[in-house]
Amino acid sequence: MSEPTFATPPKTPLAYREARAAAEAPAEAPAEVVAPPPAAPPTIGPTGRPLPDFPDPGPITEHGNATVITMCNQKGGVGKTTTAINLGAALAELGRKVLLVDFDPQASLTVGLGINPNSVDATIYHLTMERDTPIDEVILKTRVPGVDLIPSNIDFAGAEMQLINEVAREQVLARALAPTLETYDVVLIDCQPSLGLLTVNALTASHGVIVPLECEYFALRGVAMLKGTIDKVQDRLNPELKIVGLLGTMYDGRTLHSREVLQTLVDGWGDAVFHTVIRRTVKFSEATVAGEPLTTYSSESPGADAYRQLAREVLARCHDA
Ligand SMILES: Nc1ncnc2c1ncn2[C@@H]1O[C@H](COP(=O)(O)OP(=O)(O)O)[C@@H](O)[C@H]1O
Ligand SMILES: [Mg+2]
């Protein structure tokens, strides 16, 4: 073995021996550092935020004590009715007993579930305007297991005028729906596109409100006014009322425009915006024509899955639904 060389020669034999021993000692193997596995980067959802997991809420043991949620936006064609049908059907797939309330004289919800509005004997009109109508006479079973419906038809168009002269006119729907709460887990009310007395009735009868918004620039313009109505109802009539979420609908991720609208929505409303976004697809119109939810018409389609995810997100936000 060759003599070790030293930058500064050791001065004494002892120092020399120690220095030599140190130089010849096998280099100590560096402690093995186990690098943590690289954390998977969070998936960024279409709203630009990390997408959380929405766990399957599991079955429930007892039905009743329903959570009432209104689909509300004074604009038409934004996906209120489509959301009521498909969210309702997706909640029923999760074992919830669901009652859908068609609170629009246009009766799109009734038609969308394959029921002819002109052939029904008793409607939401009778329930709200003729006090002695038994609720069982008004509730119809639909073809979707676990989903019942209170239908509407054009008779209901006169209701708003008639309501004006009622005592406690804002609470008429809340009173009418009260007996259903013990049977169902979720009641979804589909509003007409207005912020009038009927919508105020729906908000007064609800625990929560979902605001569907088409991902188009003009969609954002009415939201402040809608929030004003929600605040007034909360303040004067229904302190329990909460915004469950704002739902971007008819989203087209290929267009910068759609992405910008969603971003503006999140900038203004933060976590009130659902992580779930409903993409634009012609399948929704096809399902309406077929008179069924997309979850049964095209069960495997991405649109159906989007509403299944929304159902889990809604349940996560409404703890007792
Ligand atoms: N995500 C979507 N993609 C494409 N079309 C849709 C979507 N959601 C709804 N639609 C269609 O848009 C129209 C209006 O929707 P609807 O739910 O009736 O709105 P609203 O109840 O707010 O008036 C309907 O023809 C419906 O089938
Ligand atoms: Mg509608």
Image (cartoon, rainbow, N blue to C red):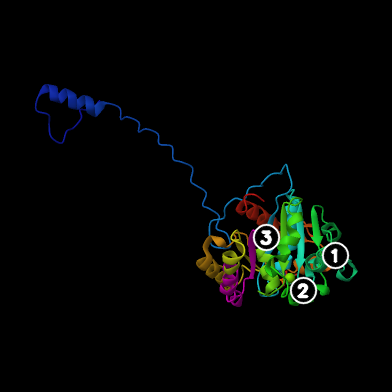
Give the mark nearest the N terminus, 3 or 1: 3
Q: Position of residue 22 (x, y in %)?
A: 23, 27
> Label 3, on which residue?
69
Q: Position of residue 28 (x, y in %)?
A: 32, 29
> Label 2, on which residue?
159
Q: Quadrant of the N terminus?
A: top left
Residue 74 relative to residue 118: left or right: left
Q: Position of residue 277 (x, y in %)?
A: 63, 63
Q: Amino acid at mark 3?
A: Ile
Locate residue 260: give its quadrant.
bottom right
Q: In what quadrant does ligand 1 lie?
A: bottom right
Locate residue 71: give its quadrant.
bottom right
Magenta residue span: 206-231
Residue plotted at (35% across, 31% down): 29
> Label 1, on which residue?
114
Residue plotted at (78% across, 61% down): 293
Q: Amino acid at mark 1?
A: Gly
